[in-house]
């Protein structure tokens, strides 16, 4: 089965909107106008869009629903050749098809936004096909309560595969943990579409994800700029075995000199680790968090320390948005999670053709 790479976006939210997207090359920044800044270098699988995460999870703005006008999806359409991930026009799924989705956790605002995109794609698909009742395309959305719980995620994958879905959509906690499940899927002709965070396997049909290396590198550039190129910098990452965590960390640390990297683990909270880092390194002037939970932990530790430290994160939960407004977080890189969810469903239906 031919593998397809579907690239989504990364953008940065600060005082106003600063957006940009990374490619596999080293990132560079352009001059801003009206508080908007875009990096022009884009690979054939990346695109730019304004942030979606800043909206309340319960709301579904028209700009989220109208995928035809979404800049991310427009660029994907232009660059995907014969494979169009911006619309459902050429899809003809079997009645009653079941899409199983297993993600890292179901609690964060990021995954809530991904789910909205998926639910809307399925709704649009059923409307297009005229499916009602038992004929409707169905989707499940599951994941462990904690992003460190690899065993629970594996058990969930096993459970959904036993239900023989048409497609499995997977965001793996541990990029090396799912080989047996991917082999089982292949044996049962269940294509696998990876979203957000990949696996080290050839048994994947397509990937819908941000260029996390470039996002980390651009974050390093922005944080260095914020501290005037002086002072120590530390990093707080989510699970080290996650591809998103690894790529963001590598992109950041290969771009700027750092004094410490802490990885999320079940033994010590990220807030406790950040507090220890701030005590051990009194000259830390900048701190980078690789996702919502990591950034929130850093914000708590910095607040408790009473020090002025430039914090920059990824994702945009309510706490992060409030911190940006208050100026306690200089900015946050935000993925088009809604678009990622919508495009993943399109990729899933194409994989099932």
Image (tube, rainbow, N blue to C red):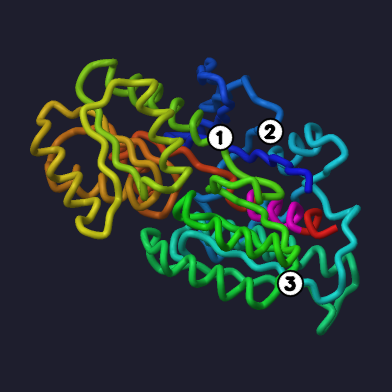
Rendering coords of residue 249 (x, y %): 38, 34
Q: Residue 45, labelled with which disc?
A: 2
Q: Residue 98, labelled with which disc?
A: 3
Circle 2 SS class: loop
Per the model, the C-alpha gap separating discs 3 and 2 is: 27 Å
Q: Residue 211, labelled with which disc?
A: 1
Q: Is residue 1 above or below residue 74?
A: below
- Mark 3: few, some, or many residues within 10 Å (few <14, many ≥20)? many
Of residues 37 and 243, the one drawn nearer to the viewer in this rendering? 243
- Mark 2: few, some, or many residues within 10 Å (few <14, many ≥20)? many
Q: In which quarter of the image is the C terminus?
A: bottom right
Residue occupying image coordinates x 82% and y 64%: 125
Q: Earlier in the sequence, mark 3 or mark 1?
A: 3
Q: Residue 350, labelled with which disc?
A: none
Marks 1 and 2 in Cβ contact (< 8 Å)? yes
Q: Is residue 62 above or below residue 41?
A: below
Per the model, the C-alpha gap separating discs 1 and 2 is: 9 Å
Residues in magenta, as a range: 340-348
Q: Earlier in the sequence, mark 1 or mark 2?
A: 2
């Amino acid at each position: 089965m031919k593998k397809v790479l579907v690239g989504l976006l990364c953008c940065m939210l600060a005082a106003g909107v600063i957006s940009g997207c990374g490619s596999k090359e080293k990132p560079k920044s352009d001059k801003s106008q009206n508080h908007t800044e875009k990096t022009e270098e884009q690979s054939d699988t990346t695109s730019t869009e304004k942030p979606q995460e800043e909206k309340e999870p319960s709301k579904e703005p028209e700009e989220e629903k109208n995928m035809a006008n979404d800049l991310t999806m427009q660029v994907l359409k232009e660059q995907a050749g014969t494979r169009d991930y911006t619309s459902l026009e050429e899809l003809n799924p079997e009645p009653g098809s079941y899409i199983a989705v297993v993600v890292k956790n179901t609690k964060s605002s990021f995954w809530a936004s991904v789910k909205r995109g998926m639910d809307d794609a399925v709704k649009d698909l059923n409307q297009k096909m005229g499916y009602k009742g038992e004929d409707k395309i169905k989707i499940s959305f599951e994941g462990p309560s904690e992003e460190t719980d690899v065993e629970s995620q594996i058990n969930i994958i096993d459970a959904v595969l036993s239900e023989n879905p048409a497609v499995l959509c997977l965001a793996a906690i541990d990029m090396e943990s799912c080989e047996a499940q991917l082999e089982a899927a292949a044996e049962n002709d269940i294509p696998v579409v990876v979203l957000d965070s990949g696996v080290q396997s050839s048994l994947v049909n397509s990937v819908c994800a941000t260029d996390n290396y470039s996002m980390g590198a651009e974050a390093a550039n922005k944080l260095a700029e914020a501290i005037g190129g002086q002072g120590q910098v530390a990093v707080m990452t989510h699970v080290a075995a996650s591809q998103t965590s690894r790529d963001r960390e590598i992109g950041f640390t290969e771009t700027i000199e750092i004094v410490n990297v802490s990885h999320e683990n079940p033994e010590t909270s990220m807030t406790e680790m950040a507090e220890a880092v701030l005590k051990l390194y009194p000259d830390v002037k900048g701190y980078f968090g690789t996702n919502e939970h990591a950034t929130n932990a850093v914000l708590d530790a910095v607040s408790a320390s009473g020090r002025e430290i430039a914090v920059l994160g990824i994702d945009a939960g309510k706490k992060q948005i409030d911190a940006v407004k208050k100026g306690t977080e200089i900015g946050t890189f935000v993925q088009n999670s809604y678009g990622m969810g919508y495009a993943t469903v399109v990729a899933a239906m194409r994989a099932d053709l």
